[in-house]
Image (spheres, helix red, strand yellow):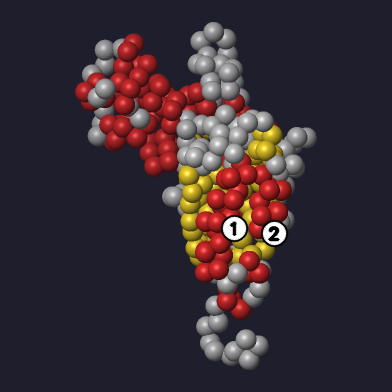
Amino acid sequence: MFNDKTNDIDMDESLEKNLVIGLDLGGTNSVFGIVNARGKIKATTAIKTQVHQKVEDYVSASAEALAPIIEQVGGIGRIKAMGIGAPNGNYYKGTIEHAPNLPWKGVVPLAEMFSKALGIPVALTNDANAAAIGEMAYGVARGMKNFIVITLGTGVGSGIVVNGQLLYGCDGFAGELGHVTMVRGEKGRLCGCGRTGCLEAYCSATGVARTAKEWLQTTTTPSVLREMPMDDITSLDVSIAAEKGDKLAKDVYEFTGHMLGEACADFAAFSSPEAFIFFGGMTKAGDLLMEPVKRAYDEHVLPIFRGKAKFLVSSLSGSSAAVLGASAMGWEV
Ligand SMILES: [Zn+2]
């Protein structure tokens, strides 16, 4: 190899340990990718999460699924480390702790288990933090030192980067901006965390569907959504209806974006980010969501912060975004 002077040498082929493994661990699927330093996925595989009731079985099944794709990229000697993005992931301890949507209860030392199974270092954090690291390594946050990633999916998550470092807090769980209280008192909606009035209860994909269903029940505003069975309505249905000009659906996005913008105005007071980066399926709604976010932000933010933060949508969006985010942690271990 030393004498190989052919032009156009693919750096991936010529250097050792220049790949990382990313694992996007979700309640249903676990998706693995082997990624190079430029954020290109070289190989990918997946297993079902829920079928493995014992975490030991899950790790064995993962190692088995990974073996052929590790061979495909030139063997484990090429892999520097692995990064895992998982719900309730504790970065300091490499554990998943009391994750409601996973089959394994209590505190699971998953990073250590994978490290033993594969023989490489393994880092683990929650999915939103992984998204923030991914944006920093390969996405729109390259070169930024202060920004907040907000993930809009089934829940609302966040990854906060301050002075170039992800904020982990005293216990590894910092950055739960989805659970700041937006509506105080009895009127606050019940959130999945057991408290009421959280941002997540309104501005997640589930929250958008809940708002639409609530308004369909409490108003007589005509809407194409009334033609659907109430239980089937999703945030995507609401955005499709809104794009077609449906007033109720447009109002739902206006309400959601406004609340999200107000929340961002408060977050600016905390860490003065240069950008808010939105990540996840709901960003497909585009300006329908982003316009009211920006408007509400400008209305509510402290004057010293006005006009400073950019509002961006993740450039990693798509099915591989979470895997890329997780993999990016592998460069830092
Ligand atoms: Zn909550």
Q: Residue at x 37, y 36 (%)?
A: 288
Res 323 seen here: no
Q: Give how far across and how far down residue 310 sits, in percent.
A: 54, 44
The label shown at residue 21 is 1
C-alpha span from label 2 to label 1: 10 Å
Secondary structure state at the residue bearing disc 1: strand
> Which image quadrant: the C terminus?
bottom right
Q: Is residue 86 above or below residue 267?
A: below
Q: Give how far across and how far down residue 114 sits, in percent.
A: 66, 51
Quadrant housing residue 176:
top right
Q: Is residue 305 left or right of residue 217?
A: right
Res 115 seen here: yes
Quadrant housing residue 95:
top right
Neighbour tally class for label 1: few under 14, some 14-19, many 20 plus, Cα within 10 Å: many
Q: Amino acid at mark 2?
A: Ile
Q: Is residue 270 above or below residue 55?
A: above
The residue carrying mark 1 has its beta carbon less than 8 Å from ligand 1: no
Q: Amino acid at mark 1?
A: Ile
Q: Give how far across and how far down residue 65 sits, in percent.
A: 52, 56
Q: Which residue is mark 2?
A: 120
Q: Is residue 72 left or right of residue 96?
A: left
> Which image quadrant: the N terminus?
bottom right
Secondary structure state at the residue bearing disc 2: loop
Q: Is residue 205 left or right of residue 19?
A: left
The residue carrying mark 2 has its beta carbon less than 8 Å from ligand 1: no
Q: Earlier in the sequence, mark 2 or mark 1?
A: 1
